[in-house]
Image: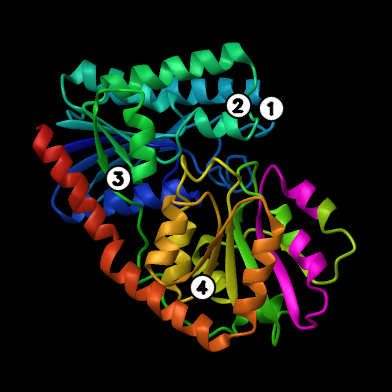
Amino acid sequence: MKIQVLCPHFEPDSAPTGEFMSAIVNHLGELGHELHVVTALPWYREHAVEAGWGGKITRTENRPWGKITRVHPFPTDKTNIAARAAAFAGFTAIGLITAIVDRFKPDVVFAMSPPISLGLAGWMAAKRRGVPFVFNIQDVFPDVAIETGTITSPRVIKTAKAMEKFVYDNADVVTVLSEEMQRNVESKTNSTTSIIPNFVDISTFEPTPLENSYREEFGLVGKRVVMYCGNVGFSQSIELLADAAREMVDIEDLVFVVNGGGSAIGEVRRRAEGLDNFRVIPYQPVERVPEVLAAADLHVIPLRQGLAWSSVPSKLYKILAVERPVIASVDEGTEVGRVVVEAGAGHAVPPDDPAPLIASLRELLDTPEQRAEMGKSGRAWVEEWTTPARAAAQYEAVFNELI
């Protein structure tokens, strides 16, 4: 089978969606399929094209399973919505031209959102070739952007919703990460949907000792560490950790760590000003992420109210894979909280409220045996349910059925 892939990030770019698509493509390649990936030059970490990748609008490289064509992403400040929309449009246009003029003749086109514009490109590329179009949704757009206040203009919202519906209606299959996302999509379209959860590479993310070089480097040896690791944006209520740190200064060996960066990092620093038990540590290299996650006694995943229905952070599976417990501050009954509870890997508490989060933190910090048991339970869950090979086989089945 020949598969054309359109995605915003791909290895070595460090975005979670890039890690996802890289693993899926590599496993599909191992299954004997030929692929052409159209993606962006690496740019996610600093929102600028990484050193050594600039100088050209497009770059092509060969892989054992096919080839990658990388096009310029026109990176901009996340907070500048107009500039960001223009950048997505430019990236999408060049990506579409690349896909339709290439000699590669696919049997199916597979595109990812966000950005939703890649759905339009995927549909046009598939229509041009006369082949099926499969659309993968990592975050439901524009719902997430509306909930976070990223877009507020009624005209922009109306246009985004019209684009979303058009892409859904013209996709042969829309793949989603959870039941909540499936209900969301099915309320807007009659197209076929399929739930294929994200995953973790359990050979890369393995249980390792708590005390490691990351702790040594950042002065965390001997401390009890509560961590948030990842993008610090408008979707995450990271200020809850600062509130918790302020209320838990009585625990002398406790340190709250935010490891990452993003558009809301300045607000996090402001909320944590004057707190000796709160640290902000920059993004670490991709290959170091397993060590970073293993350095925490306990992880927190805080999504603002209403967002857990439209988004499933892939970091959850990585945390479970390294045998660390999780407190999910999310809407009740949504995928993240349900997985944490079903796996016996931690607690789920209401979003945007520091009181239940603090109560849960105190309970788990005082019970190391319970944390250890939760860690082992979470690892067992991901070993059974969420591996790249399993997900790739599910996508292969979707493609085969359409063809």
Q: Amino acid at mark 1?
A: Asn
- Mark 1, mark 3: which one is toward the viewer? 1
Q: Earlier in the sequence, mark 4 or mark 2?
A: 2
Label 3 packing within 10 angstroms: few (<14), some (14-19), many (20+): few
Query: Does 350 appear above or below 50?
Result: below
Q: Quadrant of residue 241?
A: bottom right
Gap between marks 3 and 2 measured at Cα: 30 Å
The mark closer to the camera, 4 or 2, is 4
**Residue drawn at x 54%, y 70% as measured from the top left:** 293
Label 1 or label 4, whichever lies nearer to me, is 4
Q: Amino acid at mark 4?
A: Pro
SS for callout 4: loop
Distance Cα–Cα, label 3 vs label 4: 40 Å
Comparing 83 with 32, the one in front is 83
Residue 267 in the magenta stretch? The answer is yes
Q: Of 33 and 255, which appears nearest the observer?
A: 255
- CB under 8 Å between callouts 3 and 2? no
Report how far apart the C-alphas of labels 1 and 4 lie in the structure. Answer: 36 Å
For disc 4, the neighbor class at 10 Å (few under 14, some 14 to 19, many from 20) is many
Residue with the most extreme top position: 155
How far separated are the C-alphas under marks 1 and 3?
35 Å
Point out the tag, 1 or 4, that comes first from the N-terminus: 1
Residue 80: mark in rendering: 1
Vertical placement of residue 319 versus 90, above or below: below
The residue to which callout 3 is attached is 62
Question: The N terminus lies in which quarter of the figure?
Answer: top left
**First to last magenta residue range:** 243-269
Q: Quadrant of residue 202?
A: bottom left
Q: Nearer the viewer, mark 3 or mark 2?
A: 2
